[in-house]
Every structure is written in structure tokens, then in C-alpha cells.
Amino acid sequence: MEKVEYKKVKELLDGMVSLAAKCKDGQTAELDAKLIMNFGKGKSDTTFSSITVEGYTITCDGETEQFANFDKLCARLEQLGAADGKHIFITKCGDYNSVAQFEAKGAFDTLDMAGVLDFYPEADEFELVDTDPVPEKMSDEQVENLQNECRAIAERETRRAYEALSAKKRAALPPFEQLWQEIGEEVKAHLKKVKYRRLKKGASPFICDHVGEDTKYSEPLVLFWNAYQSYEQAERQCEQAESFKEAAGEDKIFEDKKYAPLLPHLISSRMTFGWHCTRGPLAKVHRFKLNDDTKKWLKQYQSDYDLEKLQDLALYCGERLLYSSCTHEVFRNDCRDKR
């Protein structure tokens, strides 16, 4: 629990941040502002102009109370024992357990490129990703390694979701190894139907669209939609990888004067369907040394979200991932303390 001054609580609520406060009986009071989005004056004018606050709400034990102004909200919180006249006893701020954590995340999210690099003084290597690479010829061994990686990523992500289920939900399902094998058999059978055009008329070629209709497993729906989708995506990627044995492309990105300064600092390059922030189409991940020269090159961009052909910046200390950002989706993660 964190004691937060009334003024700060109002600022957060008015800024569209939901809060939770602890009442004297141990219950949680959820606090929100009633926000009105204002548009143009005419009925056909959909131009957004502003957001105004027209009151506040407290939701406690499934019941919601409305208050015309912040003072009345505070008076009610004092009655509930969730405030002392100066402070409100906050237990959650947005998705965080304290206002301090919420504001630290906000500061982190607004770091520019120089700020990100300064935030990780221990970083000695970095990665940038070409998300639209030229397919290059691969040996049989390289293709097999890529295929094994695709399947391992799909299995690992699904296992993580399976293990995150409650013990009660897991008890209603087979062991993960059996589950994954049976999902795989269904996916491969479905892909054969797609290949030989044996699907019913109008049926989706993607098995995840069949979850809840004619797949063996369907509940919990989110788990199994993702499980079938992940297995099928990996199999499609593995099939695509076979074509790389005959590919004739040549990567010339470092012949571009924009990226040529990075070449002397290149450590490795690898083709993959999954990297530090996401997985999907074929990509090429380049690992570089992080030094004064490469920091200078990175700092020509205001932010890692401004990166172009080579994007999705990741910072490492050796093999330990410190920082991961996704340029296109505009999100970043501090991975320093994650194991």
C-alpha cells in the first residue's frame, strides 16, 4: 500500500489512469474518472477536440457509486477508511502496484535513443533486425537448425501458457507433452487437407479458426487458439525454410551508405522466424559490438522507434538480454532483471 496525496490522485485519475485503494474492511475500491470525449460542434463533424472530466466513480464489491466532483469522492473514501484527509491508500496504479512504479515506467517509455543507451551502461552488444530480408541460400544443416528453432519457439510459448493456468484447469487437461503431440497430429492432418483441397467449402485454411468447432481441444479458448495457431505457424515456416536450399538472393544491406558504418562492428547475422520481441515472417538478425562508433550511429535517430530498414533494437551484456524494443508496434521492455 502507498499513501498518495489527494492532488496526485486527482492528476492521475484526470489523466485516464485507473487506481485501486484499500478500505478499512480490507476490500478494494476501484477509482476512475468519468471521461467525456469531445468532438466537433456539428453532428457530422467527427474531429476530436478534447477530453473533459465529468465526475468520478468508486466501484467496491461489485457496486459503483458516482460523484460529481473530486472532493465528494475523497469524502466517501474517508468514510470507507481508504483515505485520511490528506492521502489515499493506493494499492494499484494502472497495471502497477504503486504510483512510483507507474511513473518509473512512464519515464522509461519516453526515453530517447541517447537515454536508452545511457540507461544500460553495462551493454556491450546490440541487435538490429531486417524484417524483410532477401532469402539467401542455406545448407541442409542450416535449414534444419532453422526448422528446429521454429518448432522450439512454438512449443516453448505454448508450454509457458499451459503452465500459467491454474492447477484446477491443468488438472482437467492431459500432460503438456501429450497435448502438444495431439495438437501436432491435428495440425498436420489439417495442413494436408489444405494442400490437397479437401476442406469443406468455405472452411478456413487456418486451423485456429476451427478451435471451438471441430478441434479436439478448445477450452480454455485463448490457450488453444494460440496453441493451434503456433503449431501451424511453425509448420508453415518449416515448409518455407525448405525453399531456402535453392534460394539465390544476396544480402547487400551493408553496401548501402546508411548502414555501411556498421559493417566493421558486425559480430554475426542469422536468418530466423523469431527474435527478441516477436516472431513471424522471415527476418535477419544482425549482432554488433556496442562501442563509441556504433553508439554515435544509433544516436542519429531520435528514438529507437525511428529506426527504418534495420529496426527492433535489443541491447545485451554478453548473451544476457537487457533491453528489447519493437519499432513497428512501438513498445519496449526493460529485461535487465528478467531471467
Image (cartoon, helix red, strand yellow):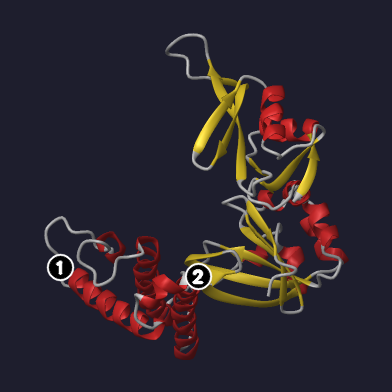
Q: Which of marks 1 and 2 is nearer the N terminus?
A: 2
Residue 111 seen in render: no
> In terms of depth relative to the viewer, which is nearer, 105 or 297?
105
Viewer-nearest residue: 224 or 332: 224
Q: What kind of element bears circle 1? A: loop
Amino acid type at mark 1: Arg
Marker disc for residue 164: 2
**Figure check: 283 above or below 202:** below
Residue 59 lies left or right of residue 259; in this view the side is left
Please tell me how crowded label 1 is: few (under 14), some (14-19), or many (20+) other residues with Cα within 10 Å: few
- Residue at the far top in the pictured view: 42
Residue 31 in the image: state x and y as whole percent: 62, 36
**In this view, 21 is above or below 54:** below
Given residues 177 and 245, the one toward you in this image is 177
Q: Which residue is drawn at 62% across and 54% down?
A: 327
**Residue bearing the label numbered 1:** 197
Other residues around mark 2 within 10 Å, as few (<14) / some (14–19) / many (≥20): few
Q: What element carries label 2?
A: loop
Residue 10, image quadrant: top right
Amino acid type at circle 2 is: Ala
Residue 145 seen anywhere in this rendered image of the structure: yes
Residue 304 location in percent, x, y?
Answer: 70, 53
What percent of the width, then of the height, locates residue 187?
28, 74
Q: Quadrant of the C terminus?
A: bottom right
Q: Which residue is drawn at 69% across and 24% down?
A: 70
The part of the image, by quadrant, that contains residue 186 is bottom left
Q: Which residue is drawn at 57% across and 51% down?
A: 329
Which one is in front in this view, the residue at disc 1 or the one at disc 2? 2
> Does residue 161 lie above or below 4 as drawn?
below
